[in-house]
Amino acid sequence: MELLQLKYFQTVARLEHMTHAAMELKIAQPSLSKTISRLEEDLGVPLFDRKGRQIKLNHYGKTFLTRVDRIFMELGEAKRELEYLSGLHLGMVQLAISIPSILPDLISSFLAQHKNVFFQQLVAGNESMVHLLEKGEIDMCISSTPIEGSDIEWIPLLTEEIYLMVPENHHLAGRESIDLEEVKNEAFISSNTGLGVRSITDYYCREAGFVPRISFEGDETMVIARLVQQGLGVAFVPALIWHIAPHKSVSLLRIKKPVCERTIGAGRSKRRHPSIAASNFFEHVIDYFAGISSRITRNL
């Protein structure tokens, strides 16, 4: 059994189409078919159910694929560990984050001490983050809800209050606090479905006895604030986001019932060997949030 056979099997298993797999692998389709057949002969069981030209991964194939995926992940980690020991790739950090508005201050404060580090960043929801960590495709993530997995370490960094942002001429604008049910008939300007803060705020609305009527979805905090300024709806805003970019011509209301909070945390795979840069940045993230917590409370 050779690694090339396993790589071919992995591709066919993902696509469940021999011709498409051959095109992706840039080999002739008959050669690919023979390779898979030889692999099945070596294993003594069929890995695919075949009906005419259609193939589908069967029970044996799914079990085998789990092990093959693990083999290639371990090989990748072995390479990373050797690179770490030899001092290569000291400057790469691959990061997924659900709250990208914190990045400028977070990264600039890190780069002030580590000038040669290069970042690759993805905006992702929790489900995608788990997949990326488990596959070893990122060094770490920063999420606004807990990330769970048997091989994932997730460290809480900051628990913050979530406020309601309304236009200055809104009938609630003079209030310091409200019960969330008081805005059940309002139009909401909201973050996109699947992002952490959207899941949290949808939950709190259900706790208050209603489903929010969404008039606009987006992932740009400044755009959401501008739409609120224009009187097109109300919006939730976490304390950290307000601290980073306070908005003019809007009023900020505390929600006293239910108490609306979220916990931001950092996660990484226990199985992935971190580079020097990734390890340093993870520690920096912990220190950064420890320092910012008191500043958020003072500025609100």
Image (cartoon, rainbow, N blue to C red):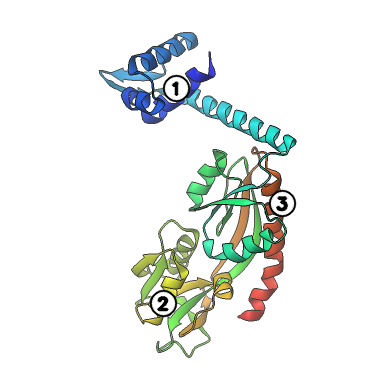
Rendered residue at 38%/14% (across/down): 31
**Up-down relation of residue 40 to residue 207 (above or below):** above
State the count of labels.
Answer: 3
Q: Secondary structure at mark 2?
A: helix
Between 183 and 100, the one nearer to me in the picture: 100
Residue 45 x/y as whole percent: 44, 12
Mark before the other along the chain sequence, 3 or 2: 2
Mark before the other along the chain sequence, 1 or 2: 1
Question: Position of 48 compared to 295: left or right?
Answer: left
**Up-down relation of residue 154 to residue 186 (above or below):** above
Rendered residue at 26%/20% (across/down): 53
In which quadrant of the rendered view does residue 223 lie? bottom left
Between 211 and 50, the one nearer to me in the picture: 50
Distance between the alpha carbons at the discs numbered 3 and 1? 37 Å
Q: The disc labelled 1 sits on which kind of residue?
A: Tyr
Residue 57 x/y as whole percent: 39, 24
- Whether the residues at callouts 3 and 2 have beta carbons within 8 Å, the answer is no
Mark 3: few, some, or many residues within 10 Å (few <14, many ≥20)? some
Q: Is residue 255 visible?
A: yes
Q: Which residue is mark 1?
A: 8
Q: Which residue is mark 3?
A: 280
Q: Secondary structure at mark 3?
A: helix
Mark before the other along the chain sequence, 3 or 1: 1
Q: Which residue is mark 2?
A: 226
